[in-house]
Amino acid sequence: MYRIGLGSDIHRLETGKPLILGGVLIESEIGAVGHSDADALTHAVTDAILGALALGDIGSHFSDKDERWRGAESFVFLRFVVGLMKEKGYGVVNVDSTVSLETPRLRPFIDAMRENLANALEIEIECVSVKAKTGEKVDAVGRSEAIKADAVVLLKEG
Ligand SMILES: [Zn+2]
């Protein structure tokens, strides 16, 4: 059996905060604000897996009221959810994702993000797609007020 999942995330941007995406620290004057390390891409992928399994969302497993997760590395969440998925007897077929961010340009960092995600998901890098878009100067993304990430995953049983 196959199951498909959708994940979506948004974080506010602020000067002087680190910008981490797919576990990669991106050189940037502005970064994402969040309870954990605010890795929007990893949160979206984590939510997509939870969604595919109808197991709630990242907030229901890792509350932002919980001090344990303050500043947490988001790959801790992803690896936990991959464990849940494996317990249910599923593996990831492929992931597609889009990060929406006005600046900086993400292209130089894309392959490193894909590699990190592929390792955590226990699949080949060819099965992980990360795309980058700007906000065309409109909307919260376009005004550099926010970073957004969307992801879909396909899971296969067995
Ligand atoms: Zn998030």
Image (cartoon, helix red, strand yellow):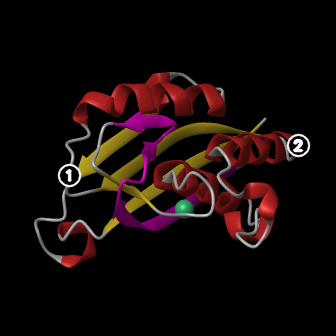
The residue labelled by disc 1 is: 103
Along the line of sight, the residue nearer the viewer: 158 or 72? 72
Which labelled disc corresponds to residue 87?
2
Asked if residue 115 is among those painted magenta in the image, a careful observer would answer: no
Magenta segment, prevailing SS (helix, strand or loop)? strand
Please tell me which residue is depicted at 68% across the width and 49% down the height of the picture. 72
Which amino acid is tagged 2? Glu
Q: Which residues are magenta?
A: 2-26
Q: Quadrant of ligand 1?
A: bottom right
Quadrant of the image occupied by residue 3: bottom right
Give the percent coordinates (x, y) of residue 12: 40, 69
Asked if residue 17 is among those painted magenta in the image, a careful observer would answer: yes
- The secondary structure type at the circle numbered 1 is loop
> From where the camera sits, is residue 81 visible?
yes
Q: Is residue 117 above or below residue 4?
A: above
Q: Is residue 117 above or below residue 150?
A: above
| Quadrant showing the C terminus | top right
Please tell me which residue is depicted at 74% across the width and 41% down the height of the picture. 82
Q: Is residue 130 above or below residue 16?
A: above
Give the percent coordinates (x, y) of residue 5: 59, 59
Which amino acid is tagged 1? Thr
> From where the camera sits, is residue 57 visible?
no
Q: Would residue 94 be found to the left or right of residue 101 on screen? A: right
Q: Is residue 68 above or below residue 141?
A: above
